[in-house]
Amino acid sequence: MAEGILRVNIEKGEISYEDVPEDLQKLGGRAVTSSIVADEVPSNCHPLGPNNKLVLAPGIVTGTSAPSSGRMSAGAKSPLTGGIKESNVGSRFAQTMAKLGLKAIIVEGMPEDGYKLLHISQEDAKFLDASKLSNIGLYEAYEKIHDEFGDKVDICSAGIAGEMKASNAGLCFNDIDGLSSRYAGRGGLGAVMASRGLKFIVLDGKGASGVEIKDKEMFERGKKKLVKGLKEHDVTKPGGALSSFGTNVLINILDESGGLPHRNFSAGSDENAEKVSGEKKADMIKELGGVRPHVCSPGCIIQCSEVWTKKGGKDPVGVLEYESVWALGPNCGIYDLKIIGELNRACNDLGLDTIEMGNTIAVAMEGGMLEFGDGKGALKLMDEIRKKTHTGRLLANGADLVGKALGVYRVPTVKGQSIPAYDPRAVKGIGTTYATTTMGADHTAGYTVATEILSVGGESDPLDPSDKAELSKNFQIHAGFIDSSGYCLFTTFATLDDPETMEGMAETIGGVIGEEFTVEDMEKMGKQVLAIERKFNKEAGFTDKDDRLPEFMREEPLPPHNEVYDVSDEELDMIHED
Amino acid sequence: MTGVTVRFFANLREAAGSKSVQVEAEDVGSMVEILIEKHPELGDEMLDEKGELKDTVKIMVDGRNIDFLEGLHTKIDKTKKVAVFPLIAGG
Ligand code: SF4
């Protein structure tokens, strides 16, 4: 029976269940993945070699009726950054995994060749041959898997990019319609999974016993407050901005703030932004026959998701997130949502992270491989990856590698990972997070944008460098908790503005683990996660010098505000001092 | 004299009935008054019960939140870009 920690090793043909060690019992998500990676993976190992492990873990409340909690973490040593990685995703897979009683799945070993599918149900777990499902796109593979195992099963997979062991290979999960559209995209975890000989994990949740709630009264009390808060806050409420326009509603506001990077971080605003905005996309979804709002996993109140399609509802892509639209759009000088949709579909199909891919294409454009704005050319590059040509292999390894190969100076990466959709020169707090998080450039690791641009949880002038170290530090700590809890990061918009909603969230955690859990405990958990990850990275050879933004961001002023990134090195180094 | 162009975003577009309007005003405070006079639907969206600008409405002048400029006293003219947003978020 599925329960505890499932450890699988294709090289040795072993599948075993282990009891959950005491120190992990009250943790979930990122706290579990980072603890296991730190304990079991040598920090100096090669990410694609025999000593790395892929760890999956649902959040603490995932699989319960807590709202917007269908999230989980994937962790390993990252082939992209060389440091510890936690990549977070929302998918029904997370809920099914939790309901099956799985605290974690650990994938280890390095078989010589071939790919397996790991099938897990309430009865057993077994390896099946996956050769027929390899070297094909994930949309097709997911259809085949659903045909064979039923449309209720949930899937985690590595795509063609994973088969290439590419540093930008993400881990792909299904949305509620079974589309291969939800990603733990960042950091190359698809390559870690594929190099363990594993292509797919299929979960059959039939008969699953569900998540044990140790103190039901506390849980229900907390849930009531949290649901109320989410339903009342302007951002998270049904019919609010996120459900009406999706995350892409940010395009216009970031462009207006001068912080939306265009053409490989050479400008912070452009009059064409409106053409790819959330407002425009919501209108087009109606015209084309897509779905809005939608959810990544059942039980979400906020409902930020959607299904983008071609005309007549054809070739559904899944969600076009703000980050993806930006990376594959304005950052490449492409202002056509239909082309962006096709590029996003290609990423989902090949198993690639959209943020890294968009930045890679933009750097390729800067390096002269194609012109900015050349959408058709960008689609051709995706075909190179599909065909596994040498050019394709280069492109699937991210912006850093392509920048080096093409002699590009303006390469927007930190610790080898591409910078997301907020320019650090116009939004200095998020730049501080990019520089100092253990993850490499990652907005979700400390989302200061909430306060700097969106005025959630207070206000902070995005151009003023003086308070950014403290701001980023607090957001990084909170992210360490949120990523462990199983709650979607977007719940933060409501919890930061209302102490009772925050308290409700804490009580739901307390209800599941069966002991009092306070807002202070959230902070403790967040700090503990960051400390584990910092230690791993330090042992892997990272120093303060790695906690820096690329040089051009201190040298080249960004129009229209003509600011450079000017948070001092001393302040950056203070963030993790304790 | 042509006025300043004020652009609306997200749900506020519907209330304003268009993506942008022209307003002749010297500062943001008087701009808000004129806007609401011309488009009463915007009143519900932008003002609280006391008739003050809601916390959830963000106004930017040349890409700067007016909270970090002179607030409602921030001067505007036809060379400035003015944008009005409801509370939105994403990530
Ligand atoms: S807000 Fe969006 S990403 Fe978060 S849980 Fe809901 S649908 Fe998923």
Image (cartoon, coloured by chain):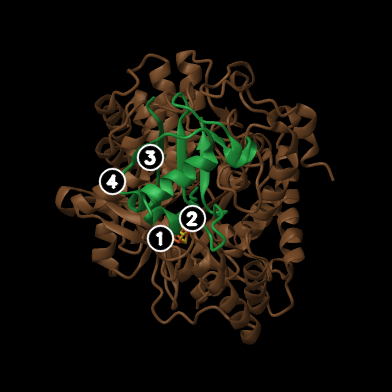
Chain colours: A brown, B green
- In the orientation shown, which residue stands out farthest toward the bottom? A217
Q: Are marks 2 and 1 in contact (CB under 8 Å)?
A: yes
- Distance from mark 4 CB to nearest ligand 1 atom below 8 Å: no
Q: Which mark is residue A325?
A: 3
Disc with the residue nearer the chain's start (4 vs 3): 4
Q: Along the horizontal axis of the image, is A530 left or right of B2?
A: right
**Up-down relation of residue A510 to residue A73 (above or below):** below
Q: Position of residue A386 (x, y in %)?
A: 29, 35
- Read off the chain for label 2: A
Residue receiving disc 1? A296
Q: Are marks 2 and 3 in contact (CB under 8 Å)?
A: no
Residue receiving disc 2? A89
Q: At numbered mark 1, what does the secondary structure look like: helix, strand or loop? A: loop
Q: Are marks 4 and 2 in contact (CB under 8 Å)?
A: no
Q: Position of residue A90 (x, y in %)?
A: 46, 59
Q: CA distance from mark 2 to mark 1?
A: 9 Å
What type is the residue that disc 1 sits on?
Cys
Mark 1 or 4: the one toward you: 1
Q: Which mark is residue A137?
A: 4
CA neighbours of label 2 inside 10 A, class few (<14), some (14 to 19), many (20+): many
Front position in the image: B27 or A103:
B27
Q: Are marks 3 and 1 in contact (CB under 8 Å)?
A: no
Disc with the residue nearer the chain's start (1 vs 4): 4
Disc 2 with disc 3 on a shared chain: yes
CA neighbours of label 1 inside 10 A, class few (<14), some (14 to 19), many (20+): many
- Distance from mark 1 CB to nearest ligand 1 atom below 8 Å: yes
